[in-house]
Image (tube, rainbow, N blue to C red):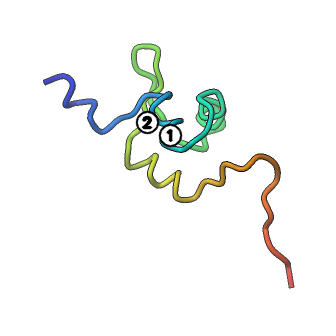
Amino acid sequence: MAEQAFDDYLDLVQASREIGIHPQSLRRLIKKNRIPATMFAGKYLIKRDKLAIFKSNYDPRPGRKHLGTLL
């Protein structure tokens, strides 16, 4: 029954695999408040729906992102 309570959550490693980035990169994004996470028993837990929203807007390519032309 306790497992059902956590079905809506992924741990840091699972979430990083889902997005396709290194766990340390995901930890950095959490610390910058770019993605919401909860600390439980020494582990970050991320809600699946919040991860899906983040993933739909996230560009995993390194470096600065092209914002398009101004004119």
| Mark number, residue 48 | none
The location of residue 54, given as percent across then percent down, is 52, 51
- Label whose residue precedes the other's in the sequence (2 or 1): 1
Q: Nearer the viewer, mark 2 or mark 1?
A: 2
Vertical comparison of 48 with 22: above or below: below
Which residue is denoted by mark 1 in the rendering?
36
Of helix, strand and loop, which one carries label 1? Answer: loop
Query: Can you name the residue that lies furthest to the left here?
Result: 1
Q: Is residue 21 above or below residue 69?
A: above
Residue depicted at 39% across the width and 40% down the height: 47
As shown in the figure, which amino acid type bears the numbered disc 2? Ile
Numbered disc 2: secondary structure: strand
Q: Residues within 10 Å of mark 1 (few under 14, many from 20)?
A: some
Q: Residue at x 44, y 29 (%)?
A: 38
> What is the x, y in percent for residue 60?
66, 48
Q: Is residue 59 above or below residue 15?
A: below
Q: Where is residue 10? Give x, y as percent.
A: 39, 33
The numbered mark at residue 46 is 2
Question: Quadrant location of the N terminus?
Answer: top left
